[in-house]
Image (cartoon, helix red, strand yellow):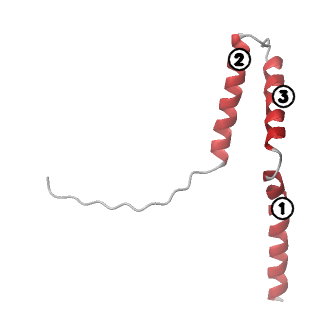
């Protein structure tokens, strides 16, 4: 009975991880093109005209927002060893 439950948990885990793994193997150029088109459309909808400084600033802001969101999704986990030696100064 216990092996059956463990096998079900393993199968469920694999079903959850498989789509993430496949997404990670996607074409980076296609993803960049998709994000570029999305940023372009967002800036147009906000009223910015292509080939203007304001449009360029909008595109930069879109990239900044995406980078910030990406940073929030991937936690910074670090490991380290700290050693302190002090003398009474």
Q: Name the spot of residue 42 as percent of width and height, x first.
A: 80, 24
Q: Could you tell whether 86 is left or right of 48 in the image?
A: left
The secondary element bearing badge 2 is classed as helix
- Determine the residue positioned at 29% across, 60% down: 84
Q: CA distance from mark 1 to mark 2?
A: 38 Å
Q: Spatial distance from mark 1 to mark 3, Cα to Cα? A: 27 Å
The crowding category of the residue bearing disc 3, from other C-alpha atoms within 10 Å (few below 14, some 14 to 19, many at least 20), is few
Whether 89 is drawn above or below 71: the answer is below
Residue that mark 2 sits on:
56
Which callout, 1 or 3, points at the residue further toward the start of the chain? 1
The residue nearer to you, when weighing 28 against 11, is 28
Residue sticking out furthest to the bottom = 1
Q: Give the number of callouts.
A: 3
What's the residue at 76%, 12% (across, down)? 51
Which image quadrant for residue 6? bottom right
5 vs 28, nearest the viewer: 28
Residue highlighted by disc 1:
18
Callout 2 environment at 10 Å: few (<14), some (14 to 19), or many (20+)?
some
Q: Quadrant of the N terminus?
A: bottom right
Q: Badge 1, how many Cα within 10 Å: few under 14, some, many 20+?
A: few
**In the picture shown, does residue 47 fall above or below 30?**
above
**First along the sequence among labels 3 and 2:** 3
Q: Quadrant of residue 22?
A: bottom right
Residue sitting at x 80%, y 74% = 10
Numbered tag placed on residue 37 in the rendering:
3
- Which residue is painted at 49% across and 60% down in the image? 79
Q: Secondary structure at mark 3?
A: helix
Please provide percent x and percent y for residue 69.
Answer: 67, 39
How far across and how far down the image is residue 7, in percent?
Answer: 83, 80
């Amino acid at each position: 009975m216990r092996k059956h439950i463990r096998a079900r948990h393993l199968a469920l885990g694999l079903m959850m991880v498989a789509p993430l793994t496949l997404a990670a193997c996607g074409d980076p150029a296609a993803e960049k093109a998709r994000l570029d088109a999305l940023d372009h459309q967002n800036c147009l909808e906000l009223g910015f005209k292509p080939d203007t400084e304001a449009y360029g600033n909008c595109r930069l802001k879109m990239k900044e927002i995406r980078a910030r969101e990406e940073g929030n999704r991937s936690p910074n986990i670090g490991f380290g060893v700290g050693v302190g030696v002090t003398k009474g100064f």
